[in-house]
Amino acid sequence: LTAALAAAACRHAETLPPQTLPPEAGTGPGGWWDALVVEAEARMPSPAQRAASVAQGKALLRAARATWPATVFDGLPATHHPIVLGVAAFAAGGTPEQAAAIAAYGSVTGPASAAVRLLGLDPLLVHRALGDLAPQVDAVAAEACEFKDWADIPAASAPLLDILAELHLQSDLRLFES
């Protein structure tokens, strides 16, 4: 999902000249930015996961605004991380394929890093596992670029993860949100 959303955001951003991205993006109802946000939220049933995604998107948007020309990001509100990632990839000169690959690799490297820090797993074995996963991650990124119509972006379900995300918010000890 994150790879498909990042590719979609990058693909749309690249169709507009950087100087006109904010006005044509349309941050009001009906604009492409809002439309993609609606598609993302329809695929994230957990309010906790949506909030974490927006928080990560806000942080990335802040970093992107500091890194690339302000005209690319002016007027764009903070939203879900993969959407901001797609526009940031565009701003850096990347392609939708590269945006999808970044998102797909982030989906496995984040948990791998957490496994090393929180579970004390051997970092070399974890990195070996990541290396072994590379062909599957590349395949996911390639598949994510095939969705030209946003309505066709997959809506895979993981009800247990949704439930755990909500329970995590009620926990006395929270180590991270993602």
Image (spheres, rainbow, N blue to C red):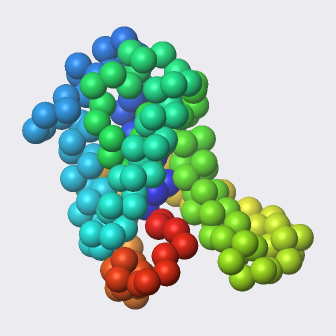
Residue found farthest to the front: 172
Kindly identify the residue that appears in the image at 40 percent across and 44 percent down. Answer: 58
Instruction: Identify the image quadrant of the N terminus.
Output: bottom left
- Expressed as whole percent of the image width and height from the top left, the position of residue 132 reads 80, 70
The answer to whether residue 149 is seen in the rendering is no
Q: Residue at x 55, y 52 (%)?
A: 103
Front in this rendered view, residue 43 or 70:
70
Q: Looking at the image, which is closer to me, 62 or 5?
A: 62
Percent position of residue 176, x then y: 52, 68
Direction from residue 42 to residue 88 in the image, left or right? right
Residue 18 occupies which quadrant of the picture? top left
Q: Residue at x 26, y 60 (%)?
A: 41
Does 25 appear above or below 54? above
Total residue callouts: 0
Q: Against 89, is 58 above or below?
A: below
Residue 120 can be seen, yes or no: yes
For the residue pair 109 and 12, the one nearer the viewer reads as: 109
Spot occupied by residue 149 in the image (x, y as percentages of width and height): 30, 48
Residue lying furthest left in this view? 29
Residue 159, picture quadrant: bottom left
Q: Is residue 1 above or below residue 17?
A: below
Asked if 112 appears above or below 171 in the picture, the reply is above
The structure residue drawn at horizontal position 21% and vertical position 42%, both measured from the top left corner, is: 34
Q: Is residue 88 left or right of residue 158?
A: right
Q: Position of residue 156 (x, y in %)?
A: 38, 73
Farthest top residue in view: 19
